[in-house]
Structure formats: C-alpha cells, structure tokens
Image (cartoon, rainbow, N blue to C red):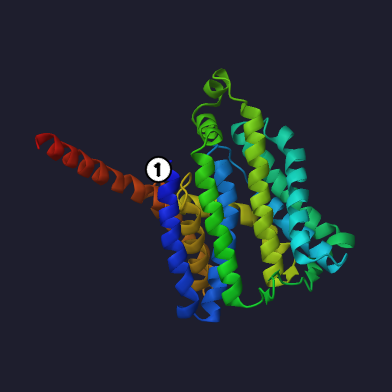
Amino acid sequence: MRRPRSVLAWAALAVAAVAIVPFLANDYWLNILIFCGLYGIMAVGLNLLVGFTGQISFGHNAFVGLGAYASAILTTRLGWPAWPALGAAMVVTALAALAVGYPTLRLRGHYLAMGTAALGVIGFVLFSEMEWLTQGFMGISGVPPLALGPWTLDTPGRFFYFTWTVLLLLCYGSARLVSSRAGRALRAIRGDEVAAGALGIATTAYRVKVFVLSAVIGAIAGSLFAHWVTYVSPEPFSLALAIQLLVMLFIGGVGTIWGPIVGSSLFTIVTELTSRYQAYSQLVFGVLLVAVLIFARRGIVGELTARLRPRSARSQGTTAAGEGAD
C-alpha cells in the first residue's frame, strides 16, 4: 500500500500545482497544456501495455481515432448528447480492441510490433477512405463541447482543469492497478511470460484485458480531443501518433507512473517551441531521444527515481543504526 499512498501524495502536490496554472498562463499556453494533458492520457493507456506488460504496440492511434470519430459521428449525425457519446465511444473501442486483441496478441516480438503497426495503418485508412461515414479528409465539424452541469467546457481554463483532473485520476488508478494482484501478474508477464504461465497466471487473458483497457483509455483521450477541437479529421490519427506516443514514453520513463506526463508535456512543448523551424523539429527530437537513451536509459522519471532511492535507503539505514546504538 506504500506505493499508491506515495503516488497519492505526489498527485495532491500535482493538483495544487495544476490549480494555480490558469492564473499564471494565458489562453495560448493553456491550450498547449491541454494538449499536454490529452497526449498524457493517451500515454498512460499505452504505458499499461508497454511499460507494465512488456507488449509493444504501434497501433494505439487507431483506438484514439476510433474514440474521436465515435463521439463526433454520434453527436453531429445522430444528435446524441456529448457524455453518452463519450461512453458509447469507450464501449465501441473496447469491443474493437477485444476483437483484434486475441489474434494480434498471439504474436510475439517483432511479429507483434508488425501486427500492431498494420492495425494502426488500417485504422488510418478506414478513417480517410470511409467517406460515407467519416467525410474523409474533409473531416467532421461542429462537434459540441462537453458540459458539467451549468458549466460548458468551452474555455481553455475550464477544459484545462477537466483534462488534467482526468489525467491525474488515471495516473493514480494505474498506480493502484500496478500494486494490486493483477499488477503483479502483469509485471511477471513482462519479466518472463513462460515462467508466469508455469506459475498459473493466465497470460493470454491478462494481455488481452490490459490491451482492451489501454485502448479504452486511448478512446477517452480521442473523445476529449474531438469535443475540445470540435473538429475531427484523419491526419491527427496516423501511424505517426503511435510513434510519437512511444517516444513520449521513452523520454518520460517506460513503466513509471509519472513518466507519461513528463514525456508528453516535454514532447508537446518542444514541438510548439520548434514549430517555426519545421525543417529542424525532427532533428531536435532525434537529438533529444538519443540523449535520453544514452544518459537516461530508464527515462527522465525512471532515472530520477533510481538516483533518489539509494539516498533514501542510506538515510534509513543510518537512522536504524542510530536507534540501535541508543
């Protein structure tokens, strides 16, 4: 129980920091931080699959796009309210992930990476070519914003609070999951799937369940994206999104609780700061990723955690020695 409590303490500190941001930032930076939160939600879902289960995936963009398109189609064409549309998007994405999860997750290693990459490509092709449903590259406009009671989440300040609240709750929920019995099974699968199966862990069932959960969290982010931008088109949900999410995880720290937030925020802010220099933006990210892989192989959060643990352990040992001498 120590780990969830420590995560809760850090989450409380993060909530306090988030609470004062709208008073310090203008609408331009609030909009950037909203996208940091949206990408962070996507990365949290992917981290459950990649970081805690050890299953690589290049198809997360398909589930994010499915959530966005489901909300957009249901609200603009069928007249659904925004919240039921978001719930339906989660259900549709869960069913789609369950349908493709069983055959795809039977693959291993490079074959699994190629299979999930194909899934991401198929998703983008469907979004762009099914014009009778998705309007193709023309996109779907007029997606209504979300509302909480009398408050419509159509201003940067309100949507910033909402997005980051969802993100922090998902981080705490992932911490609780990882420290639970199911989380220990997931870490065992990541360590050695054959050994985990020999110990009686239903490896296939766990892998499919976390795959579906990861997809649903991605759908939440996609739906929130649609309701904030109020426009959906295929471009944001190409295979490049899946690669960017993996880069975010590696920069922030794969298999850490706070890594997705750090990685997505750093990636999004650097992207915005280098937007004036399109020719050099990819170079900047290449240098950043290589630097992280060389000097912080566990990511920023993972490296900081590893460096801080020995100090705390030594301090505890010194305290215990002093108490023994007394």
Q: Nearer the viewer, residue 154 or 118?
A: 154
- Residue 127 % position (x, y): 79, 57
- Residue 181 % position (x, y): 53, 33
Q: Is residue 259 left or right of residue 213?
A: left
Q: Quadrant of residue 135?
A: bottom right
Q: Residue furthest right?
A: 132
Q: Nearer the viewer, residue 19 or 115?
A: 19
- Residue 109 % position (x, y): 59, 33
Q: Is residue 218 above or below residue 81?
A: above
Q: Return the residue at label 1.
A: 2
- Residue 79 % position (x, y): 86, 67
Q: Is residue 44 left or right of residue 3?
A: right
Secondary structure at numbered mark 1: helix
Q: Is residue 196 above or below residue 269?
A: above
Q: Quadrant of residue 144?
A: bottom right
Q: Is residue 205 left or right of residue 174?
A: right
